[in-house]
Amino acid sequence: MALTGTKKMFEKAYAGHYAIGAFNVNNMEIIQGIMEGAREKQCPVILQASEGARKYAGQEYIVSLVKTAIEQYPEIPVTLHLDHGSGFQVCKECIDGGFTSVMFDGSKYSFDENVKITKQVVEYAHAHGVVVEAELGRLAGVEDMVSVDAKDAIFTDPEEAAEFVALTGCDSLAIAIGTSHGAYKYSGDPYLDYERLEKVGKLLPNYPIVLHGASTVIQKYVQKCNEFGGKVIGAKGVPEDMLRKAATMAVCKINIDTDIRLAMTAAIRESLMTHPENFDPREYLKPAREAVKQMVIHKIDTALGCANSI
Ligand code: G3H
Ligand code: 13P
Ligand code: ZN
């Protein structure tokens, strides 16, 4: 199967009340682990590369690795997506380089500037058969969500979301409803603004919504990191049942990076600590790759709900 866009994936996900996992990729082992997980659960997958991933591995390496993956797993629909593109140029480079989906993240800009650049990206992307994810609203840090006023100031306004989609023609929209990037998402109880999500869903019927910063920060991996010499203290993410509920609503794409990092690092730490004599990278990258696979399977079962959806 060739690389695909997200249109059909999201239509099926919306109707089936599940979400597609969008996993960040930076190297071969991560891609292999994700693809093994997707094969075991028979579901589509979005492999996404950030600008940091492009700098680390090089765009050509990422594209080549993903192209090899689709040959190895022909039954799995795969989208190659740019995560958090910061401007038109990087989106264009990815479109020209073979990505089938790009995100322009204009959340730091004014509404009008965000609309302007998103429109420019949409125009170029659609002319090349590529879909575009945009973002409106600011993903809150742990200290930001102290009051209703603060939430209104930073979370996505549903009316604005509807206007933004109408003005730009973007194919999916990332919104802020309580998640944040990284391993430290909440100082208190985890929170997702389902009411806001429902309003967005009503104003944008059948329209795919994206949840960034959606790692659960699986405690098993945090504990293993710490047991084997790490220092990941007070890390907390979005519980899987909360993500599952969002996936039954308008959320069709759930972004996961931190859970990959934690799963891999826990496995590598354990391997290096328990086999101090080893200096063959394959000996610790093998369990790291297996940890990614198991983590992906776990997310599909508990949060995404997309098993057997090919
Ligand atoms: O949302 C950001 C992703 O976790 C990618 O992170 O920019 O460090 O690759 P990165
Ligand atoms: P996490 O840090 O919660 O994994 O979020 C990843 C993400 O949103 C990538 O765009
Ligand atoms: Zn993100």
Image (cartoon, rainbow, N blue to C red):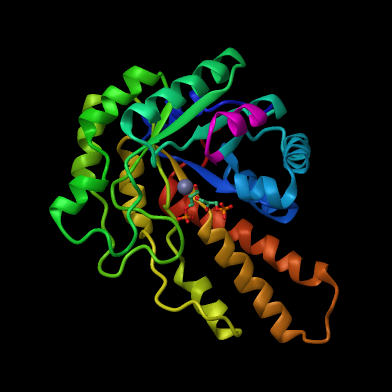
* Drawn side of residue 65 relative to residue 296, left or right: right
Residue 87 lies in the magenta stretch: yes
Seen in the picture, residue 57 relative to 228 is either above or below; the reply is: above
What is the x, y in percent for residue 63?
Answer: 73, 37
Instruction: Name the residue at 51% across, 34% down.
Output: 103
Q: Quadrant of the N terminus?
A: top right
Asked if residue 1 can be seen in this view, the reply is: no
Residue found farthest to the top: 127
Instruction: Name the residue at 68% across, 45% down.
Output: 54
Q: Quadrant of the C terminus?
A: top right
What is the x, y in percent for residue 27?
Answer: 72, 52
Most foreground residue, 309 or 118 = 118
Residue found farthest to the right: 280
Most foreground residue, 181 or 23 = 181
Asked if residue 220 can be seen in this view, the reply is: yes
What is the x, y in percent for residue 199?
Answer: 20, 34
Seen in the picture, residue 204 relative to 152 is either above or below; the reply is: above
What is the x, y in percent for residue 152?
Answer: 18, 46
Number of numbered tags placed on the structure image = 0
Most foreground residue, 15 or 271 = 271
* Drawn side of residue 274 relative to residue 50, left or right: right
Q: Which residues are magenta?
A: 83-94
* Drawn side of residue 125 relative to residue 276, left or right: left
Residue 55 lies in the magenta stretch: no
Indicate the quadrant where residue 11 lies: top left
Instruction: Name the residue at 67% across, 33% down.
Output: 75
